[in-house]
Amino acid sequence: MRPILLSGHERALTQVKFSKEGDLIFSVSKDHIVCAWYSANGERFGAYKGHQGALWTVDVDPTTTLLATGGADNTMRLWEVRTGKLLKTWDYATSVKRVEFSEDGRQLLAVTEKRTGQLSTVYIYDISPDPSEPAPSEHALRIVVDEQPRVTVAGFSYLNHFIIMGHEDGSVSQWDAKSGEHIKDNYSHEDGMQVSDLQWSADRTYFLTASKDKTAKLHDTATLEVLKTYTADTPLNSAAICPDPQQYVILGGGQAAMDVTTTSQRQGKFEARFYHKVFEEEIGRVRGHFGPLNSVAVDPTGKCYCSGGEDGYVRVHHFDPPYFDFQFEVEREARAESRI
Amino acid sequence: LDVAKKSSANKAVVEARRRLLQEWLAYRQRVQEDLEEEREALGLTAVSEERAALEVADDGETRVVE
Protein backbone atom coordinates (compact mmCIF):
# COMPACT_ATOMS: atom_id res chain seq x y z
CA MET A 1 0.00 0.00 0.00
CA ARG A 2 1.39 3.33 -1.08
CA PRO A 3 1.75 5.56 1.96
CA ILE A 4 1.53 9.35 1.96
CA LEU A 5 2.97 11.11 4.97
CA LEU A 6 1.18 14.27 6.07
CA SER A 7 3.65 16.32 8.05
CA GLY A 8 2.45 19.63 9.35
CA HIS A 9 1.50 18.89 12.91
CA GLU A 10 4.06 19.45 15.61
CA ARG A 11 2.57 17.26 18.28
CA ALA A 12 0.60 14.04 18.77
CA LEU A 13 -2.48 13.56 16.63
CA THR A 14 -5.70 13.03 18.56
CA GLN A 15 -8.33 12.42 15.85
CA VAL A 16 -8.48 12.08 12.07
CA LYS A 17 -11.65 12.13 10.00
CA PHE A 18 -12.59 11.89 6.32
CA SER A 19 -15.16 14.08 4.59
CA LYS A 20 -18.18 12.03 3.55
CA GLU A 21 -17.06 12.12 -0.10
CA GLY A 22 -13.63 10.88 0.98
CA ASP A 23 -11.69 13.68 -0.75
CA LEU A 24 -10.57 15.55 2.39
CA ILE A 25 -8.99 14.48 5.66
CA PHE A 26 -9.35 16.60 8.79
CA SER A 27 -6.81 16.17 11.56
CA VAL A 28 -6.52 17.58 15.07
CA SER A 29 -3.52 17.50 17.34
CA LYS A 30 -2.19 18.62 20.68
CA ASP A 31 -0.52 21.51 18.76
CA HIS A 32 -3.82 23.52 18.80
CA ILE A 33 -4.19 23.43 15.00
CA VAL A 34 -6.88 21.88 12.84
CA CYS A 35 -5.63 20.78 9.40
CA ALA A 36 -7.44 19.75 6.24
CA TRP A 37 -5.67 17.71 3.53
CA TYR A 38 -6.48 16.27 0.13
CA SER A 39 -6.62 12.52 0.62
CA ALA A 40 -5.51 11.82 -2.99
CA ASN A 41 -2.10 13.48 -2.81
CA GLY A 42 -1.60 14.64 0.80
CA GLU A 43 -1.44 18.33 -0.08
CA ARG A 44 -2.71 20.70 2.55
CA PHE A 45 -6.14 22.20 1.87
CA GLY A 46 -6.01 24.57 4.81
CA ALA A 47 -5.66 25.16 8.53
CA TYR A 48 -8.21 26.41 11.04
CA LYS A 49 -6.57 28.51 13.72
CA GLY A 50 -8.04 29.90 16.90
CA HIS A 51 -8.09 27.21 19.56
CA GLN A 52 -6.02 28.02 22.63
CA GLY A 53 -5.18 24.51 23.76
CA ALA A 54 -4.69 20.89 22.75
CA LEU A 55 -7.40 19.60 20.45
CA TRP A 56 -9.15 16.32 21.16
CA THR A 57 -11.79 15.94 18.51
CA VAL A 58 -13.07 16.89 15.04
CA ASP A 59 -16.04 16.08 12.82
CA VAL A 60 -17.43 17.31 9.51
CA ASP A 61 -21.04 17.49 8.33
CA PRO A 62 -22.43 15.35 5.43
CA THR A 63 -22.02 18.11 2.82
CA THR A 64 -18.48 19.09 3.95
CA THR A 65 -19.77 22.59 4.70
CA LEU A 66 -19.34 22.72 8.46
CA LEU A 67 -16.49 21.56 10.64
CA ALA A 68 -16.73 21.10 14.41
CA THR A 69 -13.74 20.89 16.74
CA GLY A 70 -13.27 20.62 20.48
CA GLY A 71 -10.38 20.70 22.90
CA ALA A 72 -8.64 21.56 26.13
CA ASP A 73 -9.49 25.28 25.90
CA ASN A 74 -13.01 24.26 27.02
CA THR A 75 -14.60 25.25 23.73
CA MET A 76 -16.35 23.64 20.83
CA ARG A 77 -15.97 25.62 17.60
CA LEU A 78 -17.86 25.57 14.35
CA TRP A 79 -16.02 26.50 11.14
CA GLU A 80 -16.92 26.94 7.51
CA VAL A 81 -14.84 24.30 5.71
CA ARG A 82 -14.35 26.20 2.46
CA THR A 83 -13.38 29.62 3.82
CA GLY A 84 -11.93 28.71 7.21
CA LYS A 85 -14.23 31.24 8.85
CA LEU A 86 -14.96 30.67 12.55
CA LEU A 87 -18.77 30.63 12.77
CA LYS A 88 -19.38 29.91 16.44
CA THR A 89 -17.63 29.23 19.74
CA TRP A 90 -19.35 27.46 22.62
CA ASP A 91 -17.71 27.78 26.05
CA TYR A 92 -17.88 25.12 28.77
CA ALA A 93 -16.56 24.55 32.26
CA THR A 94 -14.28 21.69 31.19
CA SER A 95 -12.59 20.42 28.05
CA VAL A 96 -14.46 19.02 25.05
CA LYS A 97 -13.52 15.38 24.50
CA ARG A 98 -15.74 14.53 21.57
CA VAL A 99 -17.83 16.27 18.93
CA GLU A 100 -20.03 14.60 16.31
CA PHE A 101 -22.65 15.51 13.73
CA SER A 102 -25.78 13.43 13.25
CA GLU A 103 -26.16 11.58 9.93
CA ASP A 104 -28.42 14.34 8.56
CA GLY A 105 -25.98 17.03 9.70
CA ARG A 106 -28.75 18.87 11.53
CA GLN A 107 -27.58 18.08 15.03
CA LEU A 108 -24.22 18.42 16.70
CA LEU A 109 -23.11 17.04 20.04
CA ALA A 110 -20.29 17.88 22.41
CA VAL A 111 -19.04 15.68 25.27
CA THR A 112 -17.50 17.67 28.09
CA GLU A 113 -15.04 16.16 30.52
CA LYS A 114 -15.85 15.06 34.04
CA ARG A 115 -13.69 16.87 36.59
CA THR A 116 -13.96 17.78 40.24
CA GLY A 117 -17.30 19.52 40.60
CA GLN A 118 -18.27 18.84 36.97
CA LEU A 119 -20.13 15.80 35.68
CA SER A 120 -19.70 14.36 32.18
CA THR A 121 -22.24 16.18 30.06
CA VAL A 122 -23.44 15.73 26.50
CA TYR A 123 -24.77 18.91 24.85
CA ILE A 124 -26.86 18.67 21.70
CA TYR A 125 -27.48 21.59 19.33
CA ASP A 126 -29.77 22.05 16.34
CA ILE A 127 -27.61 23.13 13.43
CA SER A 128 -28.62 24.65 10.11
CA PRO A 129 -26.68 23.22 7.17
CA ASP A 130 -26.53 26.78 5.81
CA PRO A 131 -23.39 28.49 7.19
CA SER A 132 -24.95 31.94 6.77
CA GLU A 133 -27.54 31.11 9.41
CA PRO A 134 -26.24 31.69 12.95
CA ALA A 135 -25.70 28.58 15.07
CA PRO A 136 -27.68 28.57 18.33
CA SER A 137 -25.98 29.43 21.61
CA GLU A 138 -28.52 27.40 23.54
CA HIS A 139 -28.49 23.63 23.46
CA ALA A 140 -31.59 21.72 22.36
CA LEU A 141 -30.87 18.99 24.89
CA ARG A 142 -28.39 18.41 27.67
CA ILE A 143 -27.68 15.02 29.20
CA VAL A 144 -25.90 15.22 32.54
CA VAL A 145 -24.40 11.82 33.20
CA ASP A 146 -24.31 11.34 36.94
CA GLU A 147 -25.04 7.65 37.55
CA GLN A 148 -22.75 6.22 34.86
CA PRO A 149 -18.95 6.48 34.79
CA ARG A 150 -17.15 9.23 32.90
CA VAL A 151 -18.14 9.53 29.24
CA THR A 152 -15.23 9.14 26.82
CA VAL A 153 -17.01 9.06 23.43
CA ALA A 154 -20.54 9.57 22.10
CA GLY A 155 -22.47 9.75 18.85
CA PHE A 156 -25.88 9.83 17.16
CA SER A 157 -27.49 6.59 15.95
CA TYR A 158 -29.39 6.01 12.69
CA LEU A 159 -32.36 8.39 12.40
CA ASN A 160 -31.09 10.24 15.51
CA HIS A 161 -33.09 7.84 17.68
CA PHE A 162 -30.36 7.29 20.22
CA ILE A 163 -27.25 8.82 21.66
CA ILE A 164 -24.73 6.04 22.21
CA MET A 165 -21.98 6.70 24.74
CA GLY A 166 -18.78 4.88 25.63
CA HIS A 167 -17.51 5.07 29.19
CA GLU A 168 -14.34 5.00 31.23
CA ASP A 169 -15.23 1.62 32.77
CA GLY A 170 -15.54 -0.11 29.38
CA SER A 171 -19.33 0.03 29.17
CA VAL A 172 -21.55 1.46 26.45
CA SER A 173 -24.91 3.11 27.07
CA GLN A 174 -27.94 4.07 25.03
CA TRP A 175 -30.02 7.23 25.56
CA ASP A 176 -33.13 8.62 23.95
CA ALA A 177 -31.87 11.44 21.72
CA LYS A 178 -35.16 13.38 22.04
CA SER A 179 -35.85 13.13 25.78
CA GLY A 180 -32.34 12.47 27.08
CA GLU A 181 -33.64 9.49 29.02
CA HIS A 182 -31.22 6.67 29.81
CA ILE A 183 -32.38 3.43 28.15
CA LYS A 184 -29.80 0.70 28.68
CA ASP A 185 -26.18 -0.30 29.21
CA ASN A 186 -23.94 -3.09 28.10
CA TYR A 187 -20.75 -3.88 29.98
CA SER A 188 -19.08 -5.08 26.82
CA HIS A 189 -15.42 -4.40 27.57
CA GLU A 190 -13.32 -5.50 30.52
CA ASP A 191 -14.21 -3.61 33.69
CA GLY A 192 -12.14 -0.47 34.12
CA MET A 193 -10.74 -0.53 30.57
CA GLN A 194 -12.04 2.59 28.91
CA VAL A 195 -13.82 2.77 25.59
CA SER A 196 -11.36 4.86 23.57
CA ASP A 197 -13.25 5.17 20.29
CA LEU A 198 -16.69 4.61 18.77
CA GLN A 199 -17.19 4.61 15.01
CA TRP A 200 -20.31 3.91 12.98
CA SER A 201 -21.14 1.68 10.04
CA ALA A 202 -22.31 3.66 6.98
CA ASP A 203 -25.99 3.40 7.98
CA ARG A 204 -25.28 3.72 11.73
CA THR A 205 -27.20 0.54 12.57
CA TYR A 206 -24.08 -0.96 14.09
CA PHE A 207 -20.90 0.49 15.56
CA LEU A 208 -17.39 -0.45 16.56
CA THR A 209 -15.82 0.33 19.92
CA ALA A 210 -12.11 0.23 20.69
CA SER A 211 -10.90 -0.30 24.24
CA LYS A 212 -7.82 -0.32 26.40
CA ASP A 213 -8.71 -3.98 27.10
CA LYS A 214 -7.01 -4.77 23.74
CA THR A 215 -10.25 -5.61 21.97
CA ALA A 216 -12.57 -3.90 19.54
CA LYS A 217 -16.23 -4.90 19.51
CA LEU A 218 -18.96 -4.57 16.97
CA HIS A 219 -22.31 -3.67 18.58
CA ASP A 220 -25.86 -3.59 17.27
CA THR A 221 -27.08 -0.01 17.75
CA ALA A 222 -30.66 -0.86 18.75
CA THR A 223 -29.94 -3.72 21.18
CA LEU A 224 -26.32 -2.88 22.18
CA GLU A 225 -25.63 -6.59 21.73
CA VAL A 226 -22.00 -7.47 20.91
CA LEU A 227 -21.95 -8.99 17.41
CA LYS A 228 -18.21 -9.50 16.92
CA THR A 229 -15.00 -9.24 18.95
CA TYR A 230 -11.54 -8.52 17.52
CA THR A 231 -8.71 -9.38 19.87
CA ALA A 232 -5.38 -7.55 19.58
CA ASP A 233 -2.20 -7.70 21.68
CA THR A 234 -1.98 -4.06 22.64
CA PRO A 235 -4.34 -1.46 24.17
CA LEU A 236 -6.47 0.07 21.42
CA ASN A 237 -7.04 3.77 20.87
CA SER A 238 -9.19 3.61 17.77
CA ALA A 239 -11.07 1.31 15.41
CA ALA A 240 -12.79 1.91 12.08
CA ILE A 241 -15.20 -0.04 9.87
CA CYS A 242 -14.41 -0.30 6.14
CA PRO A 243 -17.42 0.47 3.94
CA ASP A 244 -19.26 -2.34 2.11
CA PRO A 245 -18.48 -4.40 0.13
CA GLN A 246 -15.15 -4.58 1.97
CA GLN A 247 -15.51 -6.76 5.03
CA TYR A 248 -12.69 -5.39 7.18
CA VAL A 249 -12.19 -3.42 10.35
CA ILE A 250 -8.98 -1.52 11.10
CA LEU A 251 -7.61 -1.28 14.65
CA GLY A 252 -4.98 1.11 15.96
CA GLY A 253 -3.24 1.39 19.30
CA GLY A 254 0.02 0.69 21.06
CA GLN A 255 1.53 1.63 24.35
CA ALA A 256 3.67 4.70 24.85
CA ALA A 257 7.33 3.84 25.51
CA MET A 258 7.09 5.11 29.09
CA ASP A 259 4.31 2.59 29.80
CA VAL A 260 6.26 -0.38 28.50
CA THR A 261 8.68 -2.20 30.79
CA THR A 262 10.78 -4.11 28.27
CA THR A 263 11.88 -3.07 24.80
CA SER A 264 10.95 -6.39 23.22
CA GLN A 265 7.32 -5.74 24.04
CA ARG A 266 7.42 -2.63 21.90
CA GLN A 267 8.13 -4.56 18.75
CA GLY A 268 5.31 -4.49 16.27
CA LYS A 269 2.81 -2.61 18.37
CA PHE A 270 2.64 0.58 16.32
CA GLU A 271 0.83 -1.00 13.42
CA ALA A 272 -2.61 -0.68 11.93
CA ARG A 273 -4.22 -4.12 12.14
CA PHE A 274 -6.75 -5.41 9.67
CA TYR A 275 -9.34 -7.97 10.76
CA HIS A 276 -12.06 -9.67 8.81
CA LYS A 277 -15.26 -8.11 10.07
CA VAL A 278 -17.34 -11.29 9.96
CA PHE A 279 -14.75 -13.98 10.75
CA GLU A 280 -12.93 -11.93 13.44
CA GLU A 281 -9.57 -13.12 12.08
CA GLU A 282 -6.52 -10.92 11.66
CA ILE A 283 -5.72 -10.45 7.96
CA GLY A 284 -2.67 -8.21 8.02
CA ARG A 285 -0.79 -5.28 9.52
CA VAL A 286 0.56 -2.02 8.19
CA ARG A 287 3.54 -0.50 9.94
CA GLY A 288 5.03 2.96 9.69
CA HIS A 289 4.34 4.97 12.82
CA PHE A 290 7.00 5.47 15.48
CA GLY A 291 4.50 5.74 18.29
CA PRO A 292 1.00 4.56 19.19
CA LEU A 293 -1.78 5.07 16.66
CA ASN A 294 -4.17 7.46 18.35
CA SER A 295 -6.83 7.53 15.65
CA VAL A 296 -7.68 5.55 12.51
CA ALA A 297 -10.28 6.45 9.89
CA VAL A 298 -11.46 4.90 6.63
CA ASP A 299 -12.38 6.81 3.49
CA PRO A 300 -16.19 6.36 3.13
CA THR A 301 -15.63 5.47 -0.55
CA GLY A 302 -13.20 2.73 0.48
CA LYS A 303 -10.19 3.94 -1.52
CA CYS A 304 -7.85 4.56 1.39
CA TYR A 305 -7.51 4.80 5.15
CA CYS A 306 -5.48 7.09 7.38
CA SER A 307 -3.96 6.97 10.83
CA GLY A 308 -2.91 9.73 13.21
CA GLY A 309 0.00 8.89 15.49
CA GLU A 310 1.49 9.93 18.78
CA ASP A 311 4.57 10.62 16.58
CA GLY A 312 2.86 13.70 15.07
CA TYR A 313 2.29 12.21 11.63
CA VAL A 314 -0.80 11.39 9.65
CA ARG A 315 -0.25 8.46 7.28
CA VAL A 316 -2.60 7.88 4.37
CA HIS A 317 -2.58 4.49 2.68
CA HIS A 318 -4.29 3.97 -0.65
CA PHE A 319 -5.41 0.39 -1.07
CA ASP A 320 -3.80 -1.78 -3.76
CA PRO A 321 -5.86 -4.02 -6.04
CA PRO A 322 -5.06 -7.24 -4.09
CA TYR A 323 -6.83 -5.65 -1.15
CA PHE A 324 -10.05 -5.53 -3.13
CA ASP A 325 -9.51 -8.94 -4.70
CA PHE A 326 -8.77 -10.84 -1.53
CA GLN A 327 -11.67 -13.01 -0.41
CA PHE A 328 -12.18 -16.12 1.61
CA GLU A 329 -13.44 -19.16 -0.24
CA VAL A 330 -16.86 -18.90 1.41
CA GLU A 331 -17.12 -15.24 0.35
CA ARG A 332 -16.44 -16.18 -3.26
CA GLU A 333 -19.16 -18.80 -3.01
CA ALA A 334 -21.63 -16.30 -1.59
CA ARG A 335 -20.74 -13.79 -4.28
CA ALA A 336 -21.23 -16.45 -6.95
CA GLU A 337 -24.69 -16.94 -5.50
CA SER A 338 -24.93 -13.12 -5.68
CA ARG A 339 -25.74 -12.67 -2.02
CA ILE A 340 -23.10 -9.97 -1.52
CA LEU B 1 -3.91 -40.31 8.55
CA ASP B 2 -2.41 -36.85 9.25
CA VAL B 3 -3.52 -35.67 5.85
CA ALA B 4 -7.05 -36.88 6.53
CA LYS B 5 -7.05 -35.12 9.92
CA LYS B 6 -5.79 -31.92 8.39
CA SER B 7 -8.33 -31.92 5.62
CA SER B 8 -11.21 -32.52 8.03
CA ALA B 9 -9.92 -29.66 10.22
CA ASN B 10 -9.80 -27.40 7.19
CA LYS B 11 -13.28 -28.47 6.28
CA ALA B 12 -14.50 -27.56 9.76
CA VAL B 13 -12.94 -24.10 9.46
CA VAL B 14 -14.59 -23.53 6.11
CA GLU B 15 -17.92 -24.77 7.45
CA ALA B 16 -17.66 -22.41 10.42
CA ARG B 17 -16.87 -19.47 8.15
CA ARG B 18 -19.74 -20.34 5.86
CA ARG B 19 -22.11 -20.34 8.83
CA LEU B 20 -20.72 -17.03 10.16
CA LEU B 21 -21.10 -15.37 6.78
CA GLN B 22 -24.65 -16.62 6.34
CA GLU B 23 -25.60 -15.42 9.83
CA TRP B 24 -24.05 -12.02 9.15
CA LEU B 25 -25.76 -11.58 5.79
CA ALA B 26 -29.11 -12.58 7.29
CA TYR B 27 -28.61 -10.12 10.15
CA ARG B 28 -27.70 -7.30 7.76
CA GLN B 29 -30.63 -8.00 5.49
CA ARG B 30 -33.06 -7.87 8.41
CA VAL B 31 -31.62 -4.62 9.81
CA GLN B 32 -31.45 -2.93 6.41
CA GLU B 33 -35.06 -3.84 5.63
CA ASP B 34 -36.23 -2.53 9.00
CA LEU B 35 -34.34 0.71 8.48
CA GLU B 36 -35.68 1.22 4.96
CA GLU B 37 -39.23 0.60 6.17
CA GLU B 38 -38.79 3.04 8.99
CA ARG B 39 -37.31 5.73 6.74
CA GLU B 40 -40.17 5.26 4.30
CA ALA B 41 -42.76 5.52 7.09
CA LEU B 42 -41.15 8.79 8.20
CA GLY B 43 -41.30 10.10 4.64
CA LEU B 44 -37.51 10.17 4.33
CA THR B 45 -35.28 9.31 1.38
CA ALA B 46 -34.06 5.71 1.20
CA VAL B 47 -30.61 6.62 2.50
CA SER B 48 -29.37 9.22 4.98
CA GLU B 49 -27.76 12.52 3.96
CA GLU B 50 -24.28 11.27 4.75
CA ARG B 51 -24.73 8.16 2.62
CA ALA B 52 -26.27 10.25 -0.17
CA ALA B 53 -23.16 12.45 -0.19
CA LEU B 54 -21.13 9.37 -0.99
CA GLU B 55 -23.38 8.10 -3.75
CA VAL B 56 -23.38 11.40 -5.61
CA ALA B 57 -19.58 11.41 -5.54
CA ASP B 58 -19.48 7.89 -6.95
CA ASP B 59 -21.96 8.60 -9.75
CA GLY B 60 -20.68 7.73 -13.20
CA GLU B 61 -17.30 6.86 -11.85
CA THR B 62 -15.98 3.35 -11.62
CA ARG B 63 -13.66 2.60 -8.74
CA VAL B 64 -10.13 3.29 -9.89
CA VAL B 65 -7.35 1.87 -7.82
CA GLU B 66 -3.84 3.06 -8.44
Image (cartoon, coloured by chain):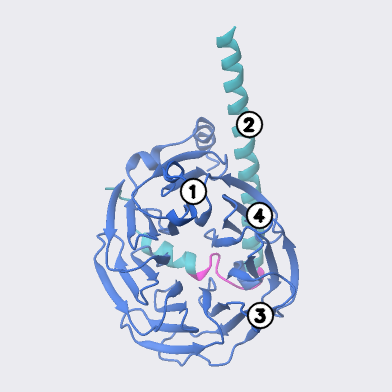
Please give the residue where the numbered disc 1 appears in the rendered image. Answer: A261
Locate residue A316, reporting x and y percent.
33, 56
Q: In terms of image quadrants, where is residue A24?
A: bottom left
The quarter in which the N terminus of chain A is drawn is top left
Residue with the mark numbered 3: A119
Left or right: A206 in relation to A283: right
**Eyeballing the image, is A59 above or below A333?**
below
Q: Which residues are magenta?
A: B41-49
Residue A340: where, in percent of width, then height? 52, 43
Task: Give the secondary structure at mark 3.
Answer: loop
Residue at label 4?
Answer: A189
Q: Are marks 2 and 3 on the same chain?
A: no
Residue pictured at 64% horizontal, 55% vertical:
A219
What residue is shown with label 2?
Answer: B16
Do marks 1 and 4 both belong to one polypeptide chain? Answer: yes
Which amino acid, mark 1?
Thr
**Crowdedness of circle 4 by 10 Å Cα count: few (<14), some, many (20+)?**
many
